[in-house]
Amino acid sequence: MEDDEVAAILGGSSQLNAGPSRAPCPARGANREFDRYFDEATEEIDPGEADMDELRRAAWATWKTKPPAALAGDSVSAQEDDELARVLALSAQEHQTHVSRQSSVRPLDNESDDEDLRKALALSHEEARAPKRQKRDDTPEEERRMLAEAMAASLAEGGPSTSSASSCRPPAVGRSQSTLPIPTSTVPSATSSPAPSDLSATPSVLRLGGQMIDRAQLEKERRERQAAREAQSNGSNPSQQPAGAVPSAGPARFNGMSSIGVPSSSTASSSSGAASTSKSSGGNSNTAQKALSAGVSHPFQASGPFPSDAAGQYYLEGEMRHTALTIGNPTMDRTFSPKQIVGKHSEISLIIMSSFVIDDQWIGDQAILPPPEVVPTIVVRSHLRDKPEHNGKIELQVNGELWVYPKMVGGWGSAHMKYFWIFYKTGRLRAVISTANMVPYDWEWIENTVFVQDFLPSPKPTPFREGHLPHDFPQQFRNLFVHTRVHTAIRHLTANHPNGSRIPFKPDDGFADMTKYDWSRVKVRIVMSVPGTYSGNDKVDEYGVCRLGKVLSEEGWVPKGGEKVAAEFQGSSLGQYSLDWFDKFYQFCSGKTARALAGRPKPSAWPSIKILFPTLATVDASALGRGGGGTMFAGKAFNKVTQPLFHDANSKRGGVLMHAKMLIAIFEPEGRHLGFEASPSKNGRRKASEIEDGDEGVGGWIYVGSHNFSPAAWGTVDLKKSPPVLSVKNYEIGIVFPLDRRNARATADLIAPYKRPARKYSAGDVPWDQNAHMPLE
């Protein structure tokens, strides 16, 4: 809202001046004449569309004053006008609701932020260069549309809480309209949301950006929705639901998976607990038993016990687990639930999170996140396709959340990242990188993998030096935060949120606060994609597949003499592949860099990368049937040429489809690559001459993160140009870590959520194809 707009509302001109002697704006009741004037001037203004406190102050500043022609302007008034314009620009705007109210998004910009952005990017690029430290692909960019169209009848048809009217509307924003609950004490304390007493210091009625938030009313409405949902499900045991019924998550960003009939024995709600086990965690996995007997251990699964503080358990060495499902075969493997990831609400001081798909109402109804009017919360998420004006903007929601829409280049691509940074009042920082979106089916019905690592304050904080962070891990996140303008969002919350003064993380000096934490236990490297076109060897090495090759080269996670990489990629969406792209991807997986590949001749054969994707038969035999395949996209990847590369994807938990994205690379003797060719060595054993240093060192590596196996996610590299050029469509983030040479294959078997070795497609097999195989509604 500009000064002239404010003045127009108040019936005056923005050039009116209150003069130097004007007293501070009186509180309501202190000047009844002014109260009447203000009420009359703003009687047609919706308090939900403007900051009434700021309008009142503006009205006082111009009440009974003369034009500047009769009064000399003063710096105090000018300063106040500047402050008014700045604060009103940050005020809450009109938001999308289920009655089609449109949001008015204003950028939370200022020149200092832009300068910080340029400075931080320059520093990030400079440090990234230090050692050790086509065509559009259809499938990933169409994921949003396909989710909306192919799964439109999902929860709307089977879920009792979705009305027929709402099911016909486009995907709706949930938590800006639907209210957030006050967490209750019904969840175990170690991983639960806080009881109302935990939040007693917060007033029951708050004002955020001009919005009045009655927390008691929010909780009342949430309970009414929950009671209505239970009543509509006949008030009976979930196992008595019709076969076609689905646990409803309410109106999500995208409606859920289509026509899913959940088995009666598998309808446990995610709200039933934050325990690390569920129905799917009742027995021991054969893979884990074999690994244990062979002396193989998971590199990111400690035996425990784990340390804990007021916010819950934490994992200083990093912990990787699959999601706690409510279907599938039993397993005793530890799992993660969303509530475990977040921790105790009353101990959180700031949340920065990102997810491609978000079910806001599920998050609110299940109390997965703390109320954003209490805990400052930044959500990095895709803007709606029919709202291109939101691209690259930041929007304040009525509940106090700040939504950051990453800048998409050229209108294509996806903000496909899934991560958390959670700051606790205990001083601890938690970083989470996941393959799961913040939707119920990603945590209950399909396989996903989550990596969590906690960081304590460093006993000897590293002195901040311009352009330097103590480890590559925070350096990569700083780069990402700058690209997505998280620094601007933090500044806004610090200045305007009721608990903004308690935010422990400031973006000043290029996120110098990152130096406060102890990063010494990090054993993974970040691989990130950011949309754009990058030119030059140093620039292309920062993102996508070039970043992967650079990391492997720097760390020495590369095959030795007489060895080659045998790779396999498990994902939920595939791209359209050319021989050139496929060959380059393999070369980068072998630890080559763009500089090293300059002048490489044109490939003549497809390299040995297994493509793991479920067959139609596998989907039909799964617990949820074809309706459960709503988040799997084969696109145009399968044809006569690529058919020999395809292998069936089968979860260890049986009958469960997989959304996890995992790239496994094992170093093997030349000629033997995960079953593609017979080994020239007798019995397939490596000769001593083929291995320089015996069985010591690295025998492979694994990537886990948001990247699917597509050019949009990893980028396309033009090595014919000098310097080389990398083009990336999506925002993605993941981790890569090494495997011990002595038991690389067995460790990979243990880590993967699927059965290895994967079965090669037979002559009659075809991949699951939503467009061809999804049941018609």
Image (cartoon, helix red, strand yellow):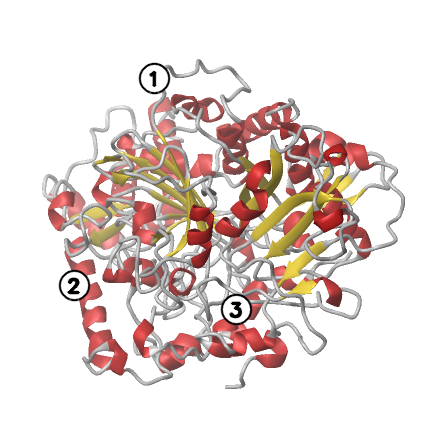
Position in image of residue 650 (x %, y %): 53, 65
Mark nearest the camera among 2 and 3 is: 3
Q: Nearer the viewer, residue 585 or 486?
A: 585
Helix or strand or loop: what does disc 2 sit on?
helix
Position in image of residue 195 (x %, y %): 14, 50
Q: Nearer the viewer, residue 328 or 227?
A: 328
The extreme front residue here reads 682
Mark nearest the camera among 1 and 2 is: 1
Neighbours of disc 1 within 10 Å: few (<14), some (14-19), many (20+)? few
Neighbours of disc 3 within 10 Å: few (<14), some (14-19), many (20+)? many
Which residue does the image show at 56% across and 62% down from the upper left? 572
Q: Earlier in the sequence, mark 2 or mark 3?
A: 3
Residue identifier under label 3:
147
Neighbours of disc 2 within 10 Å: few (<14), some (14-19), many (20+)? some
Helix or strand or loop: what does disc 1 sit on?
loop
Say above or below: 735 vs 252: above
Looking at the rendered structure, the kind of residue marked 2 is: Lys
- Would residue 161 be found to the left or right of residue 648 on screen? left
Marks 2 and 3, how far apart in space?
32 Å
Residue identifier under label 2:
220
- Would residue 679 be found to the left or right of residue 511 on screen? right
- Would residue 682 be found to the left or right of residue 369 on screen? right
Residue identifier under label 1:
459
Helix or strand or loop: what does disc 3 sit on?
helix
